[in-house]
Amino acid sequence: MTSKKKLLAIINPISGTHQKSDIPKAVKEVLDSSLYDINICFTEYAGHATLLAKEAVSSDVDCVLSIGGDGTCNEIAKALVHSNTALGIIPMGSGNGLARHLDIPMDVMGALKIVNERNIVSLDYCKANEKLFFCTCGVGFDALVSHRFAEGKHRGGMTYVKKVVTEYLKYKTETYLIVSENGKIKEKAFLIACANASQYGNNAYIAPHANMQDGKIDVTIILPFTPFDIAPMAVQLFTKVIDKNPNIRTFETPYLKIIRENPGIMHIDGEPVEMDKEIEIKCVHNGLKAIVPRENSKKLFIEPIHTAFWEVIDTIKTELDI
Ligand SMILES: Nc1ncnc2c1ncn2[C@@H]1O[C@H](COP(=O)(O)OP(=O)(O)OP(=O)(O)O)[C@@H](O)[C@H]1O
């Protein structure tokens, strides 16, 4: 008989828009108690999840569950890299980009069942000037929006879309020098996204071909565009074909350096961070253990993607008055 595995579930009470008071009960009911010795805690402040996860690694906990969004996953996963402790994800954030990329069900019960399967794989993670990210980082417009979103009181997908539209109307693009194994390019860009996983969250695929096991970062550069380009670009973003847009350049690389005109904000897994003028970004291959669905349990859930998509388009039209 194999011994039980130690599991710590860390719940971020403020992520996403759902109440979390019933989550401990669901965790205890759905997780297999013959497989796991379960401990559950709530975070008390931003950054607390990293401390809790570090303690779990030192105590040889086998799995830490992130119950929250991409920010919570980031705080936990950065304590787990290069350890034997695996990350499990129960998506309860606003965007849940990492969970969606990994095909983890969006409902709590379904995601907990995946944890019972204990299918552990090694995934890449990335660094931007030593700050770790697992999903995406970026400079330009997406970084500005993450900053405005963090300043606001409300979370949730539609709050995000409204911020995107209002900020777009006043945004001024910058020029960036990008150095990678593919050479040097200088571009005036709306944004540069560097992706380990394929999406920002909410099925917005900024790097549709990103793979978390290939040792590479998928870089997407969006060149300046007009308001008329927004609708087709939004459709392409949500249908995994943004790389076909003529305003977009893409390439893959294990390493790149972005040099911009001034220091400023960038986003790391959706959270705004002040960075220097020069940002070195690299991929660390196979540095994180994570529990993911087995091939045969992928896509057993049905998500209302199309409803979410049309909600986004309606919000854009209302905000732009078109
Ligand atoms: N107890 C807490 N009180 C206040 N902030 C917290 C607490 N615990 C964690 N945080 C912070 O909450 C922020 C948001 O969490 P998270 O990113 O998981 O949710 P989200 O933004 O709604 O989802 P997503 O990132 O998927 O869009 C993180 O920056 C994290 O540091």
Image (cartoon, rainbow, N blue to C red):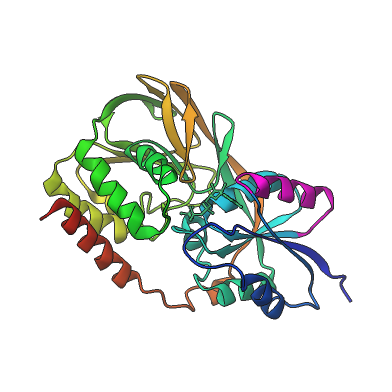
Residue at image position (58%, 44%) is 125
Q: Which residue occupies 58% across, 48% down? A: 74
| Residue 292 to residue 298: above or below | above
| In-front residue for pair 229/119 | 229
Q: Position of residue 155 (x, y in %)?
A: 43, 55
Q: Position of residue 12 (x, y in %)?
A: 60, 57
Residue 192's quadrant in the figure? top left
Q: Residue at x 37, y 41 (%)?
A: 148
Of the 4 image quadrants, the one containing the N terminus is bottom right
Q: Is residue 118 above or below residue 301?
A: above
**182, above or below 155, in the image:** above
Q: Is residue 50 magenta?
A: yes
x and y percent of residue 58 in the render? 82, 47
Our reading of the magenta stretch's main secondary structure is helix
- Whole-percent x, y for residue 200 in the image: 41, 52
Tell how many labels.
Answer: 0
Query: Would you say residue 9 sits in the magenta stretch?
Result: no
Q: Which image quarter: residue 202?
A: bottom left
Residue drawn at point x = 23 percent, y = 30 percent: 172
Magenta region, residue range: 45-62
Q: Residue furthest front?
A: 153
Residue 287 shows up from this direction: no
In this rendering, would 193 be left or right of 161? right
Q: Is residue 68 above or below residue 280?
A: below
